[in-house]
Image (cartoon, grey):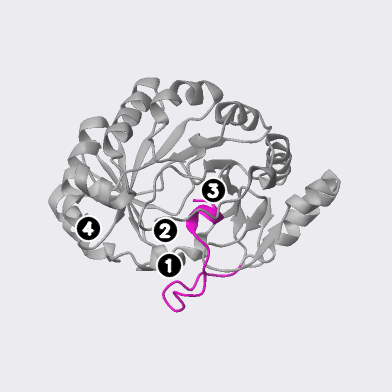
Amino acid sequence: MLQDRFGRSIDYVRLSVTDRCDLRCTYCIPKGFKDFEEPADWLTFDEIERVMAAFTRLGTRRIRLTGGEPLLRRGISQLAARLAALPGLEDLSLSTNATQLARHAEALKAAGVARLNVSLDSLRRDCMAEVTGSDSLPPILAGLMAAKAAGLAPIKINMVAMQGVNDGDIEAMVAFCIEHGFILRLIEAMPMGESGRSVHYLDLQPVLARLVARFNLVPQAKILGGGPARYWRTPSGDFTLGLITPISQHFCATCNRVRLSVEGTLYMCLGQEESLPLRPLLRAGISDAELEAAIRAAIELKPERHEFREKPRKIMRFMSMTGG
């Protein structure tokens, strides 16, 4: 098992398959941004499989396909099937904005993707247009229903809660998740790049207190996924709430993940600079043993914690460049 110098076991890789997206969410990609990686610089499917195979040999048990928007990568279901077949992998999941999900849901399920995280910040069409830069709500809802019909489960709704933007929509999202059996996860916006720093931050601790009182929520152990969310559930079990609070209550002491960007850079932390470019090593003919040694050395660089609150301007890259 991979273990960093602070004793944390690293068993989870968030794998970006593209930095491109068909939306321009205010907290992620600035309007008009076009400085994406070129496809020639992307890791190929063979290279991705090779790196992920090295990780699974070293004890990684969870892989999440991310982007950008991963469903924009041609052949994504075929890649998912290749990764799902890796010995030792226990959990293959995918994060998506769901605009393309209606035509991919059944193929993803057949390929071995079990779980989905879907970004959905409001059920108001005008609010979603404001946040995402386009009339995105209808295709997102169509994608969600297709995923539900295909049997993908659990489906988690990721809602970035923003002061003065969608903080009044949270109860409506709770009702929507109860109706469809989805898990709701409220997320504090992180100050990644200028776009992230322009978001109206909302402390989720008062929101949690309100929802606990209204729905009689009780704390739960972590749900399948191995990520940073803390969970609460209604006594009847018909609704589950997760909170991801990198600012008001950071979870660095239990961080178990690293990120691999589409061009092959391994990032140890969203809020720090430590990284290792793997693409040059792969294309120079590195052996499997040397690749595993490079990954082990990179894990030793993983910092103890981020500094989003203390140094909000420290990291200048966008979330889509790092991997969601």
| Mark earlier in primary sequence (4, 2) | 2
User: Separation of disc 1 and disc 4 at Cα?
Assistant: 18 Å
Query: Is any atom of residue 85 visible in this view?
Result: yes
Q: Which quadrant of the figure has residue 23?
A: top left
| Mark earlier in primary sequence (3, 4) | 3
Frontmost of labels 3 and 2 is 2
How crowded is the residue under tag 4: few (<14 C-alpha within 10 Å), some, or many (20+)?
some
Residue located beneath label 1 in the image:
194
User: Separation of disc 1 and disc 2 at Cα?
Assistant: 8 Å
| Mark earlier in primary sequence (1, 2) | 2
Q: Are marks 1 and 2 in contact (CB under 8 Å)?
A: yes
x then y, percent, for residue 77? 55, 27
Image mark for residue 19: 3
Q: Are marks 3 and 4 in contact (CB under 8 Å)?
A: no
x then y, percent, for residue 63? 57, 41
Residue located beneath label 4 in the image:
165
Residue located beneath label 2 in the image:
30
Q: Left or right? Give the position of 294 relative to 285.
A: left
x then y, percent, for residue 116? 43, 36
Q: Are marks 4 and 2 in contact (CB under 8 Å)?
A: no
Q: Residue, x 56% and y 51% (percent of image)?
A: 36
Frontmost of labels 1 and 4 is 1
Frontmost of labels 4 and 2 is 2
Kind of residue indicated by mark 2? Pro
Q: Which residues are magenta?
A: 303-324
User: Separation of disc 3 and disc 2 at Cα?
Assistant: 13 Å
User: Separation of disc 4 and disc 2 at Cα?
Assistant: 17 Å
Q: Nearer the viewer, residue 142 or 7?
A: 142
Q: Are marks 1 and 4 in contact (CB under 8 Å)?
A: no
How crowded is the residue under tag 1: few (<14 C-alpha within 10 Å), some, or many (20+)?
some
